[in-house]
Image (cartoon, rainbow, N blue to C red):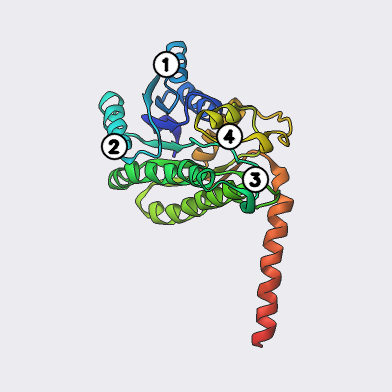
Amino acid sequence: MKLNEGRHAFITGGASGIGLGIAQSMSRRGMAVTIADINEDALAQVCASEPSLSGVVLDTRDREAWQRVKQQAEAARGPVDILVNNAGIAPNGRGFADMDPESFDRILAINLVGIVNGVFAFAADMRERGRGHIVNTSSQAGLTASIPGVGAYAVAKFGVTALSESLRMEMEPHGVGVSVLCPGYVQTNLAQNTVRAGGDIRQYTAAMPESSVTPAQVGEMVCEGIEADRLYILTHPDVWPSVAQRSEAIRADCAVREIASA
């Protein structure tokens, strides 16, 4: 979808980090942009400093709230052509054997179910109009589980990747594109937002490397990915060796089965 043909973008987690970077990139291209965020103070500050952005308060876990903010946003700025399901929290740094079940539930509810809720709210209308694009934020951890301590996060993000791949097959015949954004480490306030949502990140953040990739750069990558109708939008090419290793392990066992059945 060409963004100069788009009219209205709706972006969750839009008051900071990657979500804000995407919102700013789309706004520069002339789109009306509604940003949704659970952090009411941050939302108010962003909208005050950037009047081109409209804000709505949203906890993406709340399905009834999705319907309310959809109606509010579309009444103000017209039908949504671009949906970016971006809101999320960080891993908790704990292995499954040591994990608080509430932490697991929180990570899945925000990082996976919150995105599914966005699809429930907007996808049918896009299909009916025969236009639009949906971007779901997964992670490199949604392509390969390459480090310990991110297991619950990887479960959620693999789910987002699978959702996006399936949704693309369903929506493509109706003129609606779907992409999955798989970022590596980006300069964001994800840790602070995770704590605000009640998450435990102490073990995870200690191992986080520095990043040279900014939300503004990711915003441009997303806009380019939408215009090229790419299924996968990656921010860091260094994920490929881990993905290739996983793919090779699957290929090798397929070869074993071929030999066994010969």
Q: Nearer the viewer, mark 2 or mark 3?
A: 3
- Looking at the rendering, in which quadrant would you find the C terminus? bottom right
Tell me the tag on residue 116.
none
Instruction: Name the residue type under label 4.
Output: Met
Of label 4 and label 3, which has the lower sequence position? 3
195 lies above or below 137:
above
Of label 1 and label 4, which has the lower sequence position? 1
Q: Residue at x 66, y 34 (%)?
A: 202
Q: Residue at x 64, y 27 (%)?
A: 187
Residue annotated with mark 1: 44
Tell me the tag on residue 221.
4
Describe the element under mark 2 as helix, strand or loop: helix
Q: Nearer the viewer, mark 1 or mark 3?
A: 3
Q: Mark 2 Cα within 10 Å, few/some/many (few <14, many 20+)?
A: some
Instruction: Name the residue type under label 3.
Output: Arg
Q: Residue at x 61, y 27 (%)?
A: 188
136 lies above or below 25:
below
